[in-house]
Image (spheres, rainbow, N blue to C red):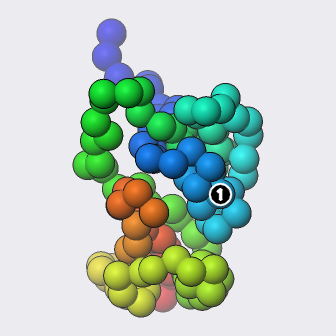
Amino acid sequence: MNLTNAKVAQLLIPVEDFEKGVAFYRDTLGVPFLFAAPPQMAFFNCGGVRLLVGVMPPGEKAQRGSAIYFQVPDIGAVHATLKAKGVNFRAEPHVVHRTPTSELWLAEFVDPDGNQLALMAEVAK
């Protein structure tokens, strides 16, 4: 047996401040909130993948290595909405790859704890 038929079911996003982390993902980004198990865990639904926003246990250091890319249908509109809510983007949405039929657009940002996030859109030509 291996991971041939596996799917990503849940991702951990480590945060220092539980309430601040929940507010950012729920209120600022608008990710649908599922439920909380305070004071350490809150769960969100992101297109069928569960995001666990959680405070690390005492003495355990958060690992911040993987970026999470949120695929959106209109990167310009989502970028403008989030920017108006105070999200600090590293750059405006920009093309990172072109094919004969589409363009891949990105706009990178971080959450209040420094977790790497990005908006991503594949735009047909």
- Asked if 68 appears above or below 89 in the picture, the reply is above
Q: Position of residue 36 (x, y in %)?
A: 69, 35
Residue at 56% of width from left, 80% of height from top? 86
Q: Name which quarter of the figure residue 38 lies in.
A: top right
Q: Position of residue 13 (x, y in %)?
A: 45, 45
Q: Nearer the viewer, residue 21 or 81?
A: 21
Residue at 72% of width from left, 52% of height from top? 32
59 displayed left or right of 49? left
- Asked if 3 appears above or below 14 in the picture, the reply is above
Q: Nearer the viewer, residue 124 or 90?
A: 90
Residue 13 in view of the camera: yes
- Asked if 119 appears above or below 20 in the picture, the reply is below
Residue 100 in view of the camera: no
Q: Nearer the viewer, residue 45 or 24?
A: 24
Q: Nearer the viewer, residue 88 or 81?
A: 88
Residue at 31% of width from left, 29% of height from top? 60
Q: Position of residue 18 (x, y in %)?
A: 56, 45
Residue at 72% of width from left, 47% of height from top? 33
- In the picture of the structure, the residue carrying the numbered disc 1 is 23
- Asked if 51 appears above or below 100 in the picture, the reply is above
